[in-house]
Structures are given as C-alpha cells and as structure tokens.
Amino acid sequence: MKHLRITQDFWTLFPEARIAVVCLTGIRNTGSSAELSEGLRCANEKAAQYLGKEVFSENPAVAVWREAYRQFKTKKGVRSSIENLLKRVEKGNPVSAINPLVDLYNTISLEYGLPCGGEDIDTLQGDLLLTLADGGESFLALGDEIEDPALPGEVVYKDELGIVCRCWNWRDGIRTMLTEQTSNALLVMESVDPARHEVLKEAAEQMSERAVKHLGGESRMMILNQSNSVFPLL
C-alpha cells in the first residue's frame, strides 16, 4: 500500500504545521460543469478579501508563506502556490479552467486563502514523502522541457523516482499531474498559521464533499500533524 509520510526533518522546521489530505478514489475527472465554472469565477472574486493591504507581500495570506519559505533552501524567486494565485487576482488575470479536479482545488484555494495541490496516485512510485531534499533529485515542472533538480535542504514532496512538487507547494511536476484520465487522486492543503488551522479543516471538508458531488467516487480526509503524520493512499 502507498502512503503519504511526513518526515521528522520537516517537523523540526515546522512543528506547528498542519497538512490536510483528501484521498479520492474512483472519480471521473472529465467533461465540464457549469456549476464548477461558476464556482471558480466566484472564487476569483472572493479572493479579493485576502488582498486588503496596499503592499501585496504584507497581506497575511501571503506574508505567512513568505516567512515559511525563509526557513529552508529555495530556488531564487519562487513563491507559494497561494501567493501565485492571489497575484493573478490582484493583476486582474483570473485563474482559468484546466480540468474539473484542478478547477475544484483552485476554487477551494482561492476561497480559503490556502495552498492546495493534487497528484495522480496511480503515477506515484512507492510512498510520497513530505521531507527535505538530499539535493539533485530529478524534477520536470509543468510547462518546462528541461529538468530542474532539487536543492539540498529544500522542502519537497517526493517519491522513489524523484520530486513530485518543489519548494513545498510551489510547482507540481509533469509525471504525477492530474489529467482527465485520473481516477485516484491525492489533494493536499497546508497551513503554517495556527490561527487558521480550523479554516484548513473546513477547507478540506469542503474539498471532500464537493469532489464526490461533482466527480463521483469516494473520499477520505485527515489532518496530519507531528504526532499523526502518516496517511494511507491505495
């Protein structure tokens, strides 16, 4: 059985973090839905609530992740996935549709101001680890043609073949991306702000409920912490 495992070196850096996981099995990630499309459109508008500061980097949803990224080695200029989404909102460049499951997790991410990503479980090789990179593990990002290996000490999601997501939640790789052929998926949301851990739980519950409603299949969810850091996938 495959598992998501969070290693102790991660918890040493971020002892108060919470990782919400939603495991979807037997889904149908095809077609289009007027309800999902409208949800994403509305989420782009709702996300303005996280952009009240005149200086973009001072918005709490951005600032907390800027500080987190200072705690480990990162590729120059990278930002958390939620910052990247909110930057698009600020610039009037709404997050657009990709496929139903990606649209759903982007909707939840924008609504709750939290990073969210997803992987195709069937493409994972062995366990998925949230850990610190040794350095040099292979990674080919979505949209890239040249591999860009991980840095030593970088927070990453990785499996036995290499990096699945670099710089914690910055960019997913091509190998495990969610496609219309995906039938089993892992969605992950993260919080580094204890004041928002309950918001994380609500976001994960919404993700689980909406995924089953729109994509069918079954869903399991859990909030991982330092004392409970393993989650079974398939």
Image (cartoon, rainbow, N blue to C red):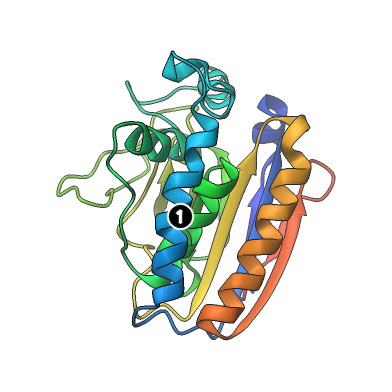
Q: Residue 129: x and y, percent? A: 58, 50
Q: Which residue appears farthest toward the left when viewing the image? A: 145
Horizontal relation, residue 46 to residue 225: left or right: left
Q: Which residue is mark 1?
A: 42
Q: Residue 51: x and y, percent? A: 49, 28
Horizontal relation, residue 56 to residue 231: left or right: left
Element at label 1: helix
The 10 Å Cα crowd at callout 1, few under 14, some 14 to 19, many 20 or more, is: some
Q: Is residue 231 above or below residue 112?
A: below
The residue lying toward the viewer, choosing from 216 and 22, is: 216
In the rendered structure, which amino acid carries the disc numbered 1?
Answer: Cys
Q: Quadrant of the N terminus?
A: bottom right
Q: Is residue 174 above or below residue 69?
A: below
Q: Quadrant of the C terminus?
A: bottom right
The residue lying toward the viewer, choosing from 188 and 132, is: 188
Q: Is residue 93 above or below residue 13?
A: below
Residue 101 appears in view: yes
Q: Residue 105: x and y, percent? A: 50, 59
Report the number of numbered marks.
1
Residue depicted at x 39% and y 29%: 151
Horizontal relation, residue 68 to residue 182: left or right: right
Q: Which residue appears farthest toward the right when viewing the image? A: 227
The residue lying toward the viewer, choosing from 131 and 143, is: 143
Q: Residue 222: x and y, percent? A: 75, 60
Residue depicted at x 66% and y 75%: 219
Residue depicted at x 40% and y 78%: 33
Residue 2 appears in view: no
